[in-house]
Image (cartoon, rainbow, N blue to C red):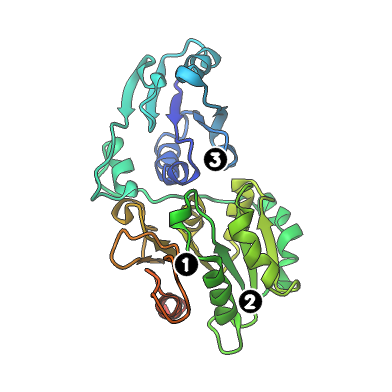
Amino acid sequence: MKRTLFVASNRLGDAVLTTGVLHYLLETEPDIPITVVCGDIPKSIFEAVPGVDRVIGVKKRRFSLHWPEVALSLGPVIWHRIVDFRSSLLGFLPTRHRHIWHGGKDDIHKAQANAQLIGLDTPLPPRILPTPSQLNASEKWLGPLNQRGKILALAPTANFYQKQWHHENYLRLAQALTAKGGILEGARIAVFGAPGEEAQAMPVVNALPVDQVICLVGKTTPMEAATILSQCDLFVGNDSGLMHTAVAVDIPTVALFGIGKPAVYRPWGDRSLCLESSPPGTPIIRPEGYSDIAPEEPLPFELVLSEIESFYTSIISK
């Protein structure tokens, strides 16, 4: 029996960005079951994909001893295809078709580079497709569909502090966008964040009206977060895995970039907006000595608000 081995990233964002390749393989080789090996964090994303036969979550061990353990758990298989985005030892298992990631270029987006790994010139954007049962389960957070209204999704966290726009800015943004006359007037605000990211996210939650805010900080799996995001009207967040998740569920997505590689990791597609600090590559955290008068932030609030209003207005007018 033919089988495909798909080795994805440990990080949520990079793992989500490989889902386009995964769906392509499932659609073009529908009779070949796929085993996914990935980190524990994105595991729930892959478990939700129809056609994926098995998902193995990897916990890193010293000296890369986790790879021999995974190889043993896979058993003696001659794989039809191995797609390895981690350049791991698993990429050297016996196979008829081998695709091993050897690093990307700083001027090619991951949606393009990931597709090139399997020999395609056409980009493969990330895709996450929540099931009806998963959508129904999200009612515990969002309430019944006919009573929801609009929802603004905010992700004020990131895996590195220099990527985090200040939480006061996110609070002001939420208030401005949902105020009377705002582009999301009266919308509720869903605040996302992983366990351990409470210091950046909870000041936003705690400052918003209780009947307006939906606190999801540390409360969802990545797939639950994706399902909730799929039902939101607009996402605004830092350069993070949640940002790529928002793109993957096809909602209008705004990403705030400072350090990092926007050419590689900007949100993909024409339903996205990437706002960069000035000068490019400057951390988007507030500079020392910041006040309402001076110095100006690398990504000023008024600029972000104006760009988001124009972007969202153009999206909904199409």
Mark nearer the N terminus (1 vs 2): 2
Residue 185: x and y, percent?
A: 60, 83
Number of marks drawn: 3
- Residue at (47% x, 76% y) in the render: 291
The answer for how far apart the CA atoms under marks 2 and 3 are is: 29 Å
Cβ atoms under marks 1 and 2 closer than 8 Å: no
- Residue at (61% x, 88% y) in the render: 180
Q: Tell me the quarter of the image containing the C terminus.
A: bottom left
The correct choice, above or below, for 245 with respect to 10 in the image is: below
Q: Nearer the viewer, residue 161 or 10?
A: 161
Residue 241: x and y, percent?
A: 49, 50
**Residue picked out by circle 1:** 252
Residue 55: x and y, percent?
A: 56, 30
Q: Residues within 10 Å of mark 1 (few under 14, many from 20)?
A: many
**Residue picked out by circle 3:** 42
Whether residue 10 sits left or right of residue 208 in the image: it is left
Q: Nearer the viewer, residue 43 or 80?
A: 43
Q: Is residue 300 visible?
A: yes
Amino acid at the residue labelled 1: Pro
Numbered circle sitting on residue 279: none
**Residue picked out by circle 2:** 187
Instruction: Give the SS element for disc 2.
Output: loop
Amino acid at the residue labelled 2: Ala
Mark nearer the N terminus (1 vs 3): 3
The answer for how far apart the CA atoms under marks 1 and 3 are is: 22 Å
Query: For the view shown, which residue lies furthest in the top direction?
Result: 76
